[in-house]
Image (spheres, coloured by chain):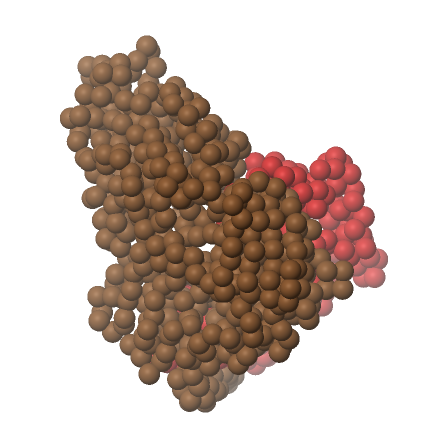
Amino acid sequence: MGTYIVKRMMAIIPIFLLATLFTFGMMRLSPVDPAEAYLAAAHIQPTEEMLEQKRHEFGLDQPILVQYVNSIIKICQLDFGISYISNKPVWDEVTYRMPATIQLALGSILLAILVSVPLGFLAGIKKNSGIDYFSRFLAFFGASIPSFWLGYLLIFFFSVKLNLFPVEGIGTVQHLVLPSITLAVPLIALYTRLLRASVLENLQEPYVLFARTRGIKESIIMGKHVLRIAISPMITGLGMNLGKLLTGTIIVEAVFSWPGFGRYFIEAIFNRDIPVIQCYVLLAAGLFLISNLIVDLIQMYIDPRISRKGGHSQ
Amino acid sequence: MSKRRTSTQVLFIFAIVLILSTLLLGCTNESKEDSASNKESKNMLTIAWPRDIGEMNPHVYNPSQLFAQSMVYESLVSYQDGGELKPQLAESWDISKDGKAYTFHLRQGVKFSDGTSFNADIVKKNFDAILKNVALHSWLGFIPKIDQTKVIDEHTFQLTLTEPYYATIQELAVVRPVRFLGEAGFPKNGDTSKGIEKSVGTGPWVLDEYKADEYATFKRNENYWGELPKVKKIKVKIIPDAETRVLAFEKGDLDLIYGEGVISLDTFKQLESTGNYETSVSEPVATRQLVMNTKKEQLSDVRVRQALQYGFNKQAMVDGITSGVEDKADYILPTNFPYTSNIDAQPIDYNVEKAKALLDEAGWKLPKGKNVREKDGKLLEVELMYDSAESIQKAMAETLQAEWAALGVKLNIVGVELPVQVQRFKGNDFDLNFFSNYGAPYDPHIFVNVVGSEGFGFKEAISSYPKKEELLQQITDVLKSTDEKERQKLYSSILTSLQEQGSIVPISYVKKVAVYQKDVSNFTFPANRDEHPFTGISIE
């Protein structure tokens, strides 16, 4: 298991390099000059002099290869450079905003687990019952409603009409409720369906029948065996979504004025703030890799068959 | 079986209880916060702004927000309605006969918010900090022309230019970069372009509390030399989404929403129609223009350009798309700006027949059975570029596409990001483009300067004007002119000529909007487009 983890960690390096190369190339393909974007964002008509000064300041007047190598060397020292727009170290700006995004992502994942595990499980063991129909409706609703619209609806009913929650901002538990629900609804839809399908599949497995014939209590079969195995695909989904959530809360952050890192990134794209974009892409790559690794480890723990398979293949 | 049901039900109930308890916890805290904020509400005005206010540095651009900079820092002169320049930190000023030396008599008894005195030394220190980055501020015409800054005595400061530039006083009224930071705000090396120690200004407000991307609170500057603001505090909530701003306003979390494009004009009209709020629309702050590139063969003929102007119903388009908030524009610059009211050019009204006749006359004929006009085997096909994030530009582009199709002109429309739009305009890589001038206190001088300078898009776009050389000479002369009458004459001629040549088409006058709760009174829009409107406001 130790070698497995080390190997997985080592794989991160080439992926990181590819990510930097990809971002760097994409940014250079864009027709927009960051120096111009900076001045356009300030609503001034740039003179050639100003542009030259800005390009020099940003290091954009150096050969592309030098720019790339310099940025890689700096990244290795955990120096992501200075934001073109705010003039502050990118790493400080990102770490300042990261906790808010993590809070939102964890809130919504927690909510999604709390709702989808019991709901998906019940829908599976009680196929075609009322709760199954409800779970199907919820899945359909959650998968089809756009997040921003759901956000507005929640704000309209729960904040403006019922005055139960604040419209926007951060700071208290109640600030977290509506954005978490907005982010959690599509996850609930997904996980409920995943778990339901997995439970149904497992109920057909011979081990259930054997367990029943051996006279094991139904609650133990369901709780200890079926749920434990059936939950595996859901954990995979969760791992995939953790990275996605941390990097993809952009719309919800904008709707709820949540001061997270998604919003910061969107502004960086519009302003062609290359150091910020680069830092974001690398962080996103890192998060995806790490969250997938954690998921694999959890799955090994839950279902030792995976570990054995994994062990052989390694 | 029953035990299984019990255990799953327990799990389910547990989850529901947990969620509900979180919700209820939320409700109790919220109501406490509500009652606390009610006590403060009379003394505090809460507004929303789409972007973080930035680091409050008076000498840099991004990410500092203009309105916030203008709350804390002041300029030597202030721009008032109709372009009148009034004393601010300078009580009066003298301009030498050759138009090069400007002597400012500073207001006495002015203190910075930290209690230190405002005097000629600090004025010089600020100017010198700005002049360390001349290239960065070179868009403002007078800065590259500054030759010397001099302290004459404690309350007299002199600025000498290398050549006369009449708009110096106008440009001193802009929000950045020429505003004054107190001694305590300067970094050790004196270079403010990399950051300041703290925001110390002479303005009516002081930054009190600040959380990036969340909110900023300003309190009244009790040292302020002028009339103290009525409200004690201003809270600026950072709400990037326009719909959320409106919902927060409807809930009563905000007292005021104001600005340009901060909410859609439809929403503005809808809020107005409820009768629950006060609303206000400003005087024109700029003109939406359509720029036609005369380097493009199809647009090089003035008859084609005029035909395109006759060929769309401007009034209906503006009314429909801006919900009647903006006015149809007859002139390239709004007439409430200095030197802009004396234009001879005839506004062009909707006349489809005339448009078709002009196109026929220009040789663009509509072959039988076809929809697009042709000349020498070429189609009358052009492309209009618009900012894809701007719903008004998009809707106008679509309207023009439909209107001109009826004339036999094929208009392709392409939405791009703002930086791409700016870059393509500058690179002369466009057929038609939307543009909006800068507003007060920059225009008309910055607008004509941009039209007459290389590398901004206009000079290249008007390259096939027959009277181009004369026009460019007039633009050079007007900025150097020291005679008021001469300036008026030149501006009238420049603006008339630009309009008659038909490559800059006025569409509508852009306006700011404000929506506020009924207990907010004395809201007025500042004459300077970038200034804040808070000083006179009170809450009853």
> In this rendering, is residue B40 above or below B492?
below
Residue at the spot x=59%, y=73% of the render?
A: B112
x, y percent for residue B508: 30, 45
Q: Nearer the viewer, residue A38 or A263?
A: A38
Q: Is residue A33 above or below residue A179?
A: above
Rendered position, B111 above or below A61: below
Residue drawn at point x = 26 percent, y = 14 percent: B363
Residue most toward the top?
B376
> On the rendered structure, is B57 left or right of A153?
right
Q: Image quadrant of residue B41?
A: bottom left
Judging from the image, what is the letter of the chain drawn in red? Answer: A
**Quadrant of the image occupied by residue A56:** top right
Identify the residue at image location x=30%, y=13%: B375
Measuring from the top left, give residue B26's x and y in whole percent: 47, 83
Q: Nearer the viewer, residue A193 or B196?
A: B196
Query: The chain drawn brown is chain what?
Result: B
Lateral position of residue A64 relative to residue B498, left or right: right
Which residue is nearer to you in this view: B327 or B439?
B439
